[in-house]
Amino acid sequence: MRLLLDTHALIWWLAGDEALSGRAREAIADKDNPVAVSATSAMEVAGKVRIGTLAHTALLARDFEAIIAV
């Protein structure tokens, strides 16, 4: 199954936040499921980092850079 994560799902996944359902976590972690993220999510994450509303920004930025490098 191909997955397209919205910004909240991406942030919750990277942060290990329990706001993301167990079913969603399993689907994202499944290596057989290609996961895509919109360029808009990158802009939204950058905006949240810039205004300081995103917790653990350094870790999330590092993880996000790894995702978009693939």
Image: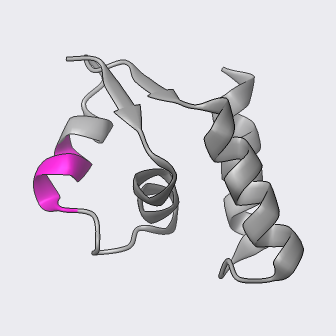
**At x 84% / y 79%, what residue is drawn?**
51
**At x 41% / y 68%, what residue is drawn?**
16
The magenta span reads 21-26
Residue 9 in percent (x, y) is at 40, 54
**At x 70% / y 30%, what residue is drawn?**
68
User: Which quadrant is home to the C terminus?
Assistant: top right
Foreground: 11 or 70?
11
Foreground: 61 or 38?
38
Residue 5 lies in what quarter of the image? top left
Q: Is residue 31 left or right of residue 7?
A: left
User: Which quadrant is home to the N terminus?
Assistant: top left
**At x 74% / y 25%, what residue is drawn?**
69
Residue 49 in percent (x, y) is at 80, 70
Residue 6 in percent (x, y) is at 44, 45
Question: Where 17 sits versus 68, above or below?
Answer: below
Q: Is residue 38 magenta?
A: no
Q: Is residue 23 magenta?
A: yes
* Total numbered circles: 0
Residue 58 lies in what quarter of the image? bottom right
